[in-house]
Image (cartoon, rainbow, N blue to C red):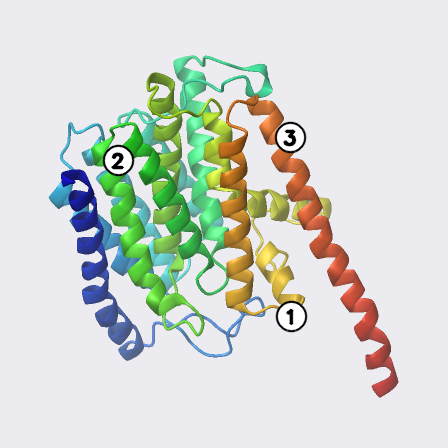
Amino acid sequence: MFPAIYYLCVTAIAVLLVLMILPSVIHVARQKNLFDDHSLSRKEHGYGIPRLGGVAFCLSIILTSLLVAKNGSGLPMYDLYAATIVLFVMGVKDDLTGVHFHTKLTVQAVVATIITVPGDIRITNLHGIFNLYQLSYVQSIFVSVLVIMFIINSFNLIDGIDGLAGTLGVIACCTFGCCFILTNQTALAALAFSTAGALVAFLAYNYSPAKIFMGDAGSLFLGMLCAVFAIKFITIKEVSSNLNLQTAPAFALAVLIIPTFDTCSVIFTRLINKKSPFKPDRNHIHHRMLRLGLTHMQTTFILCFTNLLFIGLAFLLNHADNQLMLLLFAAILFMFNGVINQLLRVKAKLVFPVGSLVS
């Protein structure tokens, strides 16, 4: 009973802090005209919306962690705070004035290095993926930095419509939080549930019609936390038998499958079209679903439900080989992406004749 009350209190504190901070952030943003640049062609909204929502839930999570998580409790909190400050400052600057992608990548590399080297949060075993198992220290650092940077950017890129990144974050944090409870990782579970609580409160203002956006400060911070949860889950599962999951890397990927897939898809598409992988466009999966005529809420629901299905599939096939699981995920996502593209082609063929008759 005590642990349940503890996690409930942690979540409630995070919720209350966001509900206290966020209205003030919205008020200040409106007073100072700190709006999203809706003149950009890739924006979905025709009116200015504050994009500093991440400030509220970042502060909430930090304050909550100061109350419930101490250094030495299984988490290198001081190192995480250092990484958070660096990433948060850069994210706020990007929300207010913009930051070049070279600077963003450099800062993300610094943050990932802080987490992996002094923080010692890193992947030490690939469990047969690419026929690799135990990694050397240098290999572990290299792989972990790349994974952390990738996940950070995946949440930054998926944050394109109302409620999507926040809801995917809630799903990821609650899933990892439950896994941490089963492996007796109290500090990690508390951090995961406080993050989920902060996001739930934020989503009350972010679901369509959105009153505020997460912004880069929020999406980058959320991506960093999910990267930490994923890596800690994989490494903890290696030494814990409390959780009956044999495919920890594949399961961690299933939890983050939609942001991961979207990032891989847009990068591949940009490279195929001989464009910079860092140049923004409207080829994200949520943009293509909106072009089918779906609303923000419908698109968010479909993608989040799909994410939950992958988590369920990972549970059902938890004794399978990691490489086999990854191939299965890739095949399903390939078909899912193909269905969306085919529907777009069908819609274009149906709309074109009508337009030609009118013109």
Q: Residues within 10 Å of mark 3 (few under 14, many from 20)?
A: few
Question: Is 347 in front, or is 221?
Answer: 347
Mark 1 or mark 2, which has the lower sequence index? 2
Query: Which residue is found at the position 52% from the left and 74% from the top?
Result: 39
Q: Amino acid at mark 1?
A: Gly
Mark seen at residue 293: 1
Which residue is tagged 3?
Answer: 327
Q: Amino acid at mark 3?
A: Leu
Query: Which residue is found at the position 29% from the left and 61% from the top?
Result: 201
In the picture as drawn, the residue positioned furthest to the bottom comes out as 358
The reply, left or right, for residue 250 in relation to residue 12 is: right
- Marks 3 and 1 close (CB-CB < 8 Å): no
Q: Position of residue 76 (x, y in %)?
A: 22, 30
Question: Is 355 in front, or is 198?
Answer: 198
Query: Which residue is found at the position 34% from the left and 67% from the top?
Result: 204
Which residue is tagged 2?
Answer: 188
Where's the N terminus, which quadrant?
Answer: top left
* Disc 2 secondary structure class: helix
Q: CA distance from mark 3 to mark 1?
A: 31 Å
* Disc 3 secondary structure class: helix
The reply, left or right, for residue 81 in relation to residue 216 is: left
Q: CA distance from mark 1 to mark 2?
A: 40 Å
Q: Amino acid at mark 2?
A: Leu
Name above or below for residue 21 compared with residue 241: below
